[in-house]
Each structure stands twice: as C-alpha cells, then as structure tokens.
Image (cartoon, grey):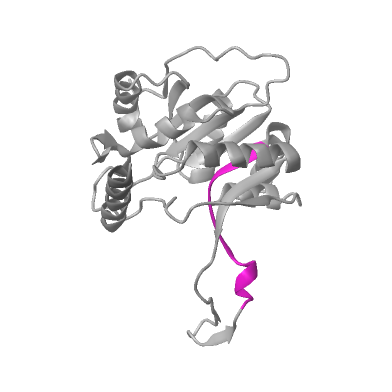
Amino acid sequence: MLMEHIRLFDVPKTYKGDKRAAAVLVAAGSFARMNGIPKQLHEIDGMPVIAHTISAFEQAEHIREIVLVARQQDIQAFCNICRQYGFKKVIAVTEGGQTRQQSVIKGVEILSSSPYIAIHDGARPLIRPQKIDEVVEAAWRFDAAAAAVLVKDTVKIADDDGFIMHTPERSRLWFVQTPQVFETQLFLHAIETASAKNYDFTDDCQLVENIGHKIFLVKSDYDNIKITTPDDIAYVKSIIKAKNVRG
C-alpha cells in the first residue's frame, strides 16, 4: 500500500493574535535536469538539501508549522530526516501532485487554520530565516508578498524567429523567488478560481495575480537560488563554504 502522507506532530498551539504563517515546502519535482540525482536528498556541508531548507523555516519566528510535499518514494526519507535533525515544526510529509500547483494544493489541504500561508521551493536551501520573516511581515501589510531580486542584465523581448522586438526597462524587472506568502482566504480563493477555469500555473504569485490582487516584492538575496542542475549544487556548496570561512 502506497503512503499518501505521514503525520509527524500535532498542529502547534496558537495564541491570541497569532499571525504566524503555515509553510508548504514543495519538493516533489522529477529532477529531470539533475541526471537522476534526487536534489533534495543530496548532501551539502554534511546535511541533505531539504534539511538546510527546513532548518531556515524552523528558525524563522513567523513560521508556526511546516508541511513537506514530496515524491511518494521520498516520503519516508523526508520523515527520517525530520527525526534525525529534530525538526519540530514539520507536522506532516505528503505526496505531491502531477504539477507544482497540484502539489501546493495537496500541502495546503493538510495545514491548520493559520492566517497566512508561505510557499517555498524545497530546493532553495540558502534562504535565510530573517528573509522569511521579512516576507511574512510584508504579507501582514499587503496580504500578498514574495521574495525577489532585481534583474542585473539587460533583457530583450524576441519574436518567434529570434529577432529582438524591444527592450523592457530593466529597473522594473525582477526575478521572483520564494518564499511567497499570502493571506489564507485570499490564497484559497485564488486556488478555487484557477481550478474552476482549469488554469495550472508554475508560480504561486500567478494564482493571486489571476484574481487581480497586487503582490508586494521584498528585496531578497541573489544567492537564494533554486537548485535545478548539478552546477547549482556546486555553486551552493561554494557559497556555504565561503560563509563558513567568514564565520
């Protein structure tokens, strides 16, 4: 019998005025660009990638609980990692869907009634706890916020034949990262609207954009990269090594 999810801890207690977010860490990808390497289980600096990511959310003051979304074959391994490192905020590990949006929905379904939902890529292990808290705080003010960095290079818009059509103003261009944090009822409404129209987005902000709500961009760090290729693993290792040397 295949496991759909494993619950590790009961939902943490809340207190009056508790505005902490519940986090969904999405780690159910196929690793198509990783030559078969399960990137979330690859060890960096003695810890699996997913453990680095969970650790940041464990330390973030504005996160109250975490649900991991994984491939079915990785569920037990993720549970073992949570127990090995003593993570207390991870309440469950659940199986992902066929697309990112479906995986996010599966994670959201297990969360408790937290007033805010934070979505993050499990393969972004260099996110800092302080940055997570900044994005949550921005969501308190604007109901929707996302980590992002300004584009450094000039971007060109090309036609179907590869010829430049025009050059957008670089000062207005951002690379959007995660976490992306939303007021819960707003996000649930966005999911319902997209599902009703059979829309399937690759970015969580698109769900909320689709219902016409503005999203505030929180200036993030350029090293908050998503591991998608073996070269990215080498890059993340070099950053962690440099940070360890600097102390």
What residue is shown at x 41% (from left), y 31% (from top)?
55
On the image, the x and y values in percent for residue 65 come to 53, 23
What residue is shown at x 47% (from left), y 35% (from top)?
25
What residue is shown at x 63% (from left), y 26% (from top)?
20
On the image, the x and y values in percent for residue 122 come to 42, 40
Residue 200 can be seen, yes or no: no
Q: Is residue 223 above or below residue 77?
A: below
In the orientation shown, which residue stands out farthest toward the front? 246
On the image, the x and y values in percent for residue 184 come to 68, 32
Q: Is residue 126 left or right of residue 232?
A: right
Q: Which residues are magenta?
A: 168-182
What residue is shown at x 47% (from left), y 21% (from top)?
89
Majority secondary structure in the magenta region: strand
The quadrant holding residue 235 is: bottom left
Q: Is residue 31 left or right of residue 104?
A: left
Q: Quadrant of the N terminus?
A: top left
Q: Number of marks in the image?
A: 0
Q: Is residue 170 above or below residue 220?
A: below
Q: Decide whether residue 171 is among the magenta residues.
A: yes
Residue 108 can be seen, yes or no: yes
In the orientation shown, which residue stands out farthest toward the bottom? 163
- Camera-side residue: 210 or 65? 65
Q: Is residue 114 left or right of residue 51?
A: right
On the image, the x and y values in percent for residue 238 come to 28, 52
Q: Is residue 163 above or below residue 212?
A: below
Q: Quadrant of the C terminus?
A: top left
Q: Is residue 89 left or right of residue 108?
A: left
